Image (cartoon, rainbow, N blue to C red):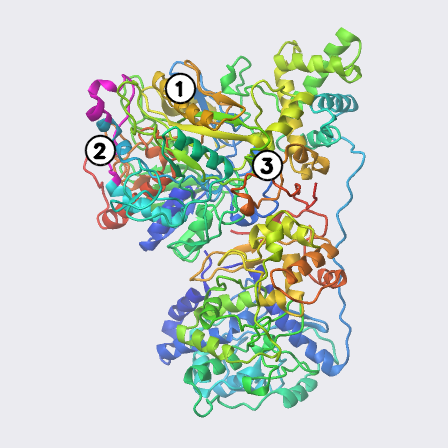
């Protein structure tokens, strides 16, 4: 049986129609209307991180700016809000590792084919990983990652990616893959998650976003003409 | 699983079998049950989540809250001690057993023409086919002097018709006559679909009383009950009799879907009507001539769909339509047969008053399940995604594209309706799970 | 202390396709049916509400509709001497959760099966000789024929509203469908979906190299459809949000859309969600099930007595439940004895990406989960395996199901992996790339099997299921051979460049990369209780009032997607229950 919610309309209709009668017959009586609730709170700007410390925030901003830089092809990860996206993700069940099977025993030396077998969840990977990398940078360069020149940052990111840095507390590839995965997510996910501001990621590659209707375009070898649209209805 | 109303009816019959068997004529009870469905008594006389016919549905009104009454045969709290005469007085005359006049929320002006044999079947059903439920009626919370029943009595004297068994006119086609009996009588279609006069009375109570009959209501609670007359653009002139039958039985046709209050009528009442009765209703409705003498047939215009096909969304509202509506209703406005209603040529879209269209854009709706068409389809609300001007723009786009021709709506109109409805607020993306009733 | 409820006629464990079909069939037969689903309520609305559902991060990357691994997963090892490790993050396969199961988030590819694959061992022995099948490969016959299943394939297609192009109906060539496909009793309910441009390119190229392209059969409706239950579907608009999502257009078949609305009209049916079945209860001699024990949303243990128990969860949950309940003898790979857990198999994928210039608009976001263009020239036994020395094959296809940029953006070989160069490559590649798959079979082997893990437990304290699985010589040979054939199609499209992703000899099963969710076997059907867990009607050989429905019954893998065969077997089993078992409860096949 369908739920009652769908059926309020007609009852309301009848009761309103007919209940007005005595009011009219007896006396004119005002009908009060209530005002619907107000619009959403505005976006906090600038974003204040909830998970990251100031030092971590500086690292994330610096690193994602190298992974997806602002350049002739348009805005990069920072302009797209990727740091905010990552910070917010780390407050979700995902960030806490609650989407994963996390029962012991863990296995640090498992073959890569078995996937993630460490006790670390995304929040740990960032917290431990950033501290370890900045420590390494300090010891080698006397500066933390965020203070290095872009070329030096690129070089370090390549070393992380290749597993060439011994960070002691975790495999460097783990920090890199976590960061790069979340950076792409933040660049291409719907803006409701905090990244992809102005739909810049979608505009870069030509993805129409939450449009989800291509009936007129199925068999046409043409560039799709409409700009992307987000879940909130924003057009890019 | 909840029992369906139909099954409830059956099980109630079985449950009562022992106690009431000495007088129950099963055929009469069956007929009474059928007529109770035709009258859709359950809709108003059942509280949300309550026992069928036990009353208690609150009716919030500007002057206070009314509650529908218990019409189960419980002697203490229901109508168990009603004689046939008491029952008849209430249903057809609008006078309670205690002598006061009923609020015309009870559509006794329509029921006045129900025949006595049908009244007896209804009486038998309510006395013996319905399970008695002890549930005290709630007093209305209406302060004196508004609670006086006297003005209602005046109202009844002025507007309620003479109680008289329906009889077909001489030489009237029996199918049409049956249709008139059901539409004007138990079906009380006019309660919603006929415009009301200064005293809130229906301006016409049958086809013979003029072109106001079933010509569509003014907006109330954010809906228009549309014209059921023969107008091509705004009535049901473009519908076939078979489409009407299909619509009443299943809540959907190839080109349209039931929404708003009519959903309840289809689910609780119309889907149970026999083929013959649905055909009679459809034929009678189709016999009503157009109210507008200058009425013209709708013709499709492909200009807008061609532009959208080529990626041109420059017409005002077109981009919003592409971003919000086209996925289901298509760039050609034709929708998808039996699932997503056509907007092109749709009488609801083309009505002078766009209230229902704006309402659906803001709040969405769900096509209900019926026995022969159990699928439910939901249009989500767009109140959170479109501001008042955007709703007006997209509604105007719909009302002026593909051959549709209807007057423009304003952002103020949208704002007014938005304030009246309980809809997700603008700018806050809702969790759709919060918009549906929880399932168990 | 467990609460014991009033008995019902039948309890259905798991409400995906198999559970929904059995629940529908059994209520039609007049049985009072309770379906227990461990996950939450789910439906097209609100779980697939437009536009909220158009969210790649939530649904695909974070797997909102997938199994909740934090509660239960499997462990995996590559060989019988290894230590299995948990599958901690969703990657290689994506089982479902909640009402509809994986049937809510699947793509919609809706194949039948090649008749010879139902008698694979007999067929290979007859055509290639007894010695052709390698030692250790434990492929078997199903014990049911295509002719017996055909009415059920046909009915399931009508329930699913499947779109496609037939080749032969009742012996007559009727259309441009797959010329290798077996005879059909009727056309597809709906005509084939349109070719997206990528599929068009594949079709043209396949013809050029002498292969036989056809429109893939898709349970994504090409037009409005009303199924035999009176349930309606809308037409697919190629939005591309199929796999991983509930279809907001009501056009992808799901148990929720195609069966549940009809079941809701029956007072004989009850669906209980958040009800995790721990075990099937047996009577004292273990020959008859008395019902099931489950944990409800509040953590209470509930006993639901029933005359008939339908085990219809996802493939490996079926096997897990049998092992936990002691139904059938657990399989031992060292002796080859026992049946439950035996013949665990999977699918063997290879992919070629083709990258084009800017004048070719593949627009990969335009797509439909089940649609596309395929060739069967190197599938099944449609080609001579004699000189090739391997068993099995693969259909090839462009099945453009809607690639989105987080997970579906692929760059040509040599493109930088991040930075400005990556950005340029992403911009150049995304709308000018197509992907084709060799969706290969995987045979069953003596030492690829399922049992209970000795170490890891689920949220209910029960041992996890352990997969012992790896690729074998036959699988490398097959996938490498067919991928070379598919390369001919890719090259005939004249792309700028291609990237071939195929297994190398010796590659181990990689749990990190998506393969498919087509896990098979472990409670296989057959004609001999010594080598199969259920008989040809999917009835347990050991406990006659338990029927185990799903891909767990497949004795080995196929090139096709399994859902069509799962549905046909479900209807086939239901028919046996309705027409034979209910009249005379007991074993339907004498051991």
Where is the C terminus of chain C found, in terms of image quarters? top left
C149 in magenta: no
Q: Nearer the viewer, mark 2 or mark 1?
A: 1
Mark 2 and mark 3: Cα distance apart in space? 45 Å
Name the residue beneath numbered marker 2: C527
Q: Residue at x 24, y 50 (%)?
A: C579
Mark 1 and mark 3: Cα distance apart in space? 32 Å
C145 in magenta: yes
With A184 as the anchor, is C122 left or right in this view? Answer: left
User: In the rendered structure, which disc, 2 or 3, sits on the residue that comes first in sequence?
Assistant: 3
Mark 2 and mark 1: Cα distance apart in space? 34 Å
Name the residue beneath numbered marker 3: C56
Where is the N terminus of chain C found, in terms of image quarters? top left
Chain ID for label 2?
Answer: C
Tag 2 and tag 1, C-beta contact below 8 Å: no
With B430 as the anchor, is B75 left or right in this view? Answer: left
Q: Are marks 2 and 1 on the same chain?
A: yes
* Extent of the magenta region: C124-146
Q: Is residue B245 above or below residue A191?
A: below
Q: Nearer the viewer, mark 2 or mark 3?
A: 3
Q: Residue furthest bottom?
A: B170
Locate residue C83, reporting x and y percent: 44, 16
């Amino acid at each position: 049986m369908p739920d009652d919610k769908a059926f309020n309309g007609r009852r309301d209709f009848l009761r309103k129609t007919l209940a007005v009668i005595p009011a009219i017959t007896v006396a004119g009586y005002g009908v009060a209307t209530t005002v619907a609730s107000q619009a959403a709170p505005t976006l906090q700007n600038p974003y204040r991180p909830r998970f990251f410390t100031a030092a971590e925030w500086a690292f994330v901003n610096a690193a994602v700016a190298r992974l997806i830089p602002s350049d002739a092809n348009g805005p990069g990860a920072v302009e797209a809000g990727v740091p905010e996206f990552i910070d917010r993700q780390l407050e979700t069940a995902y960030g806490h590792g609650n989407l994963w099977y996390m029962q012991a025993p863990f296995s640090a030396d498992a073959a890569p084919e078995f996937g993630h077998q460490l006790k670390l969840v995304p929040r740990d990977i960032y917290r431990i990983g950033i501290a370890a990398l900045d420590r390494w940078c300090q010891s080698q360069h006397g500066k933390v990652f965020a203070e290095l020149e872009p070329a030096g940052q690129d070089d370090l990111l390549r070393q992380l990616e290749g597993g060439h840095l011994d960070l002691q507390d975790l495999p460097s590839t783990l920090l890199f893959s976590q960061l790069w995965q979340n950076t792409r997510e933040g660049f291409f996910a719907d803006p409701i998650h905090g990244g992809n501001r102005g739909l810049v990621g979608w505009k870069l590659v030509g993805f129409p976003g939450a449009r989800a209707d291509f009936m007129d375009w199925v068999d046409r070898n043409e560039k799709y003409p409409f700009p992307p649209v987000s879940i909130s209805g924003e057009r890019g | 699983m909840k029992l369906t109303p139909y099954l409830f009816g059956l099980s109630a019959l079985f449950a009562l079998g022992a106690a009431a068997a000495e007088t129950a004529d099963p055929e009469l009870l069956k007929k009474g049950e059928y007529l109770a469905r035709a009258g859709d008594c359950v809709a108003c006389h059942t509280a949300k989540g309550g026992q069928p016919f036990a009353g208690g549905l609150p009716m919030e009104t500007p002057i206070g809250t009314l509650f529908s009454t218990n019409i189960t045969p419980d002697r203490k709290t229901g109508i168990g001690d009603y004689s046939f005469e008491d029952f008849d007085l209430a249903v057809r005359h609008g006078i309670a057993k205690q002598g006061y006049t009923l609020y015309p929320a009870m559509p006794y002006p329509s029921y006045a023409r129900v025949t006595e044999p049908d009244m007896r079947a209804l009486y038998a059903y309510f006395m013996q086919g319905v399970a008695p439920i002890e549930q005290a009626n709630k007093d209305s919370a209406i302060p004196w002097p508004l609670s006086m029943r006297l003005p209602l009595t005046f109202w009844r004297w002025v507007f309620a018709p003479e109680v008289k068994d329906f009889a077909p006119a001489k030489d009237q086609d029996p199918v049409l006559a049956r249709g008139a009996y059901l539409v004007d009588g138990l079906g009380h279609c006019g309660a919603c679909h006929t415009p009301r006069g200064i005293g809130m009375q229906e301006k016409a109570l049958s086809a013979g009383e003029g072109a106001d009959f079933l010509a569509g209501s003014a907006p109330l609670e954010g809906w228009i009950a549309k014209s059921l007359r023969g107008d091509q653009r705004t009535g049901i002139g473009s519908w076939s009799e078979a489409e009407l039958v299909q619509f009443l039985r299943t809540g959907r046709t190839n080109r349209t879907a039931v929404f708003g209050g009519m959903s309840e009528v289809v689910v609780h009442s119309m889907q149970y009507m026999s083929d013959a009765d649905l055909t009679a209703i459809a034929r009678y409705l189709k016999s009503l001539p157009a109210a507008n003498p200058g009425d013209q047939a709708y013709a499709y215009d492909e200009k807008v769909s061609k532009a959208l096909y080529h990626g041109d969304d420059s017409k005002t509202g077109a981009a919003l339509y592409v971003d919000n509506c086209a996925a289901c209703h298509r760039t050609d406005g034709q929708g998808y047969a039996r699932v997503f209603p056509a907007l092109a040529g749709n009488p609801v879209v083309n009505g002078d008053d766009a209230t229902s269209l704006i309402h659906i854009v803001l709040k969405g709706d769900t096509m209900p399940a019926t026995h022969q068409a159990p699928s439910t389809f939901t249009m989500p609300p767009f109140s959170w995604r479109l501001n008042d001007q955007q709703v007006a723009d997209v509604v105007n786009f719909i009302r002026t594209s593909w051959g549709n021709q209807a007057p423009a709506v304003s952002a103020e109109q949208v704002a007014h309706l938005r304030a009246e409805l309980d809809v997700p607020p603008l700018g806050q993306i809702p969790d759709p799970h919060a918009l549906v009733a929880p399932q168990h | 202390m467990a609460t014991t409820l009033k008995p019902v006629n039948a309890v259905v464990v798991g409400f995906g396709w198999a559970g929904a079909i059995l629940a529908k069939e059994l209520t039609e037969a007049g049985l009072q049916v309770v379906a227990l689903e461990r996950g939450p309520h789910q439906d097209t609305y609100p779980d697939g509400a437009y536009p909220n559902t158009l969210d790649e991060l939530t649904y695909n990357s974070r797997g909102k509709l997938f199994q909740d691994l934090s509660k239960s997963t499997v462990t995996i090892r590559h060989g019988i001497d290894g230590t299995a490790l948990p599958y901690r993050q969703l990657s290689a396969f994506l089982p479902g959760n909640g009402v509809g199961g994986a049937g809510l988030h699947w793509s919609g590819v809706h194949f039948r099966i090649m008749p010879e694959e139902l008698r694979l061992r007999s067929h290979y022995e007859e055509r290639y000789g007894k010695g052709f099948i390698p030692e250790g490969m434990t492929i078997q016959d199903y014990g049911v024929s295509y002719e017996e299943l055909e009415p059920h394939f046909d009915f399931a297609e009508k329930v699913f509203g499947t779109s496609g192009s037939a080749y032969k109906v009742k012996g007559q060539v009727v259309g441009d469908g797959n010329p290798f496909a077996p005879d059909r009793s009727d056309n597809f309910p709906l005509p084939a979906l349109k070719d997206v441009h990528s599929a068009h390119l594949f079709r043209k190229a396949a013809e050029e190299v002498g292969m036989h392209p056809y429109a893939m059969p898709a349970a994504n409706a090409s037009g409005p459809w009303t199924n035999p239950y009176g349930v309606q579907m809308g037409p697919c608009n190629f939005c591309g949000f199929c796999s991983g999502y509930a279809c907001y257009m009501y056009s992808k078949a799901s148990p929720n859309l195609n069966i549940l609305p009809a079941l809701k009209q029956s007072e004989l049916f009850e669906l209980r969600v958040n009800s995790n079945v721990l075990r099937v209860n047996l009577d004292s001699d273990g020959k008859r099930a008395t019902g099931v024990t489950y944990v409800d949303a509040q953590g209470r243990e509930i006993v639901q007595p029933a005359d008939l128990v339908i085990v219809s969860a996802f493939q490996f949950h079926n096997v897990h439940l049998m092992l936990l309940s002691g139904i059938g003898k657990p399989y031992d790979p060292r002796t080859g004895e026992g049946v439950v857990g035996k013949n665990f198999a999977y699918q063997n994928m290879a992919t070629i990406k083709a990258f084009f210039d800017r004048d070719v608009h593949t627009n990969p976001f335009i797509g439909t989960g089940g649609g596309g263009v395929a060739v069967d020239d190197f599938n099944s036994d449609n080609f001579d395996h004699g000189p090739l020395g391997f068993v099995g094959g693969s259909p090839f296809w462009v099945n453009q199901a809607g690639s989105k940029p987080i997970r579906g953006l692929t760059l040509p070989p040599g493109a930088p992996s991040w930075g400005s160069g990556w950005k340029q490559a992403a911009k150049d590649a995304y709308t000018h790339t197509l992907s084709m798959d060799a969706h290969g079979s995987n045979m069953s082997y003596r030492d690829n099997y399922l049992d209970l893990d000795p170490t890891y437990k689920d949220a209910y304290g029960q041992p996890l299921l352990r997969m012992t699985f790896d690729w074998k010589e036959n699988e490398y040979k097959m996938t490498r051979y067919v991928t070379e054939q598919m390369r001919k199609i890719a090259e005939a499209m004249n792309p700028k460049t291609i990237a071939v992703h195929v297994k190398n000899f010796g590659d181990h099963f990689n749990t990190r990369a998506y393969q498919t969710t087509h896990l098979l076997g472990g409670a296989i059907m057959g004609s001999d209780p010594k080598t199969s867990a259920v008989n040809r009607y999917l009835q347990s050989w050991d406990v006659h009032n338990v029927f185990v429905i799903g891909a767990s019954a497949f004795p080995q893998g196929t090139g096709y997607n399994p859902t069509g065969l799962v549905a046909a077997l479900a209807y086939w089993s239901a028919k046996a229950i309705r027409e034979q078992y209910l009249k005379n409860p007991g074993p339907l096949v004498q051991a």
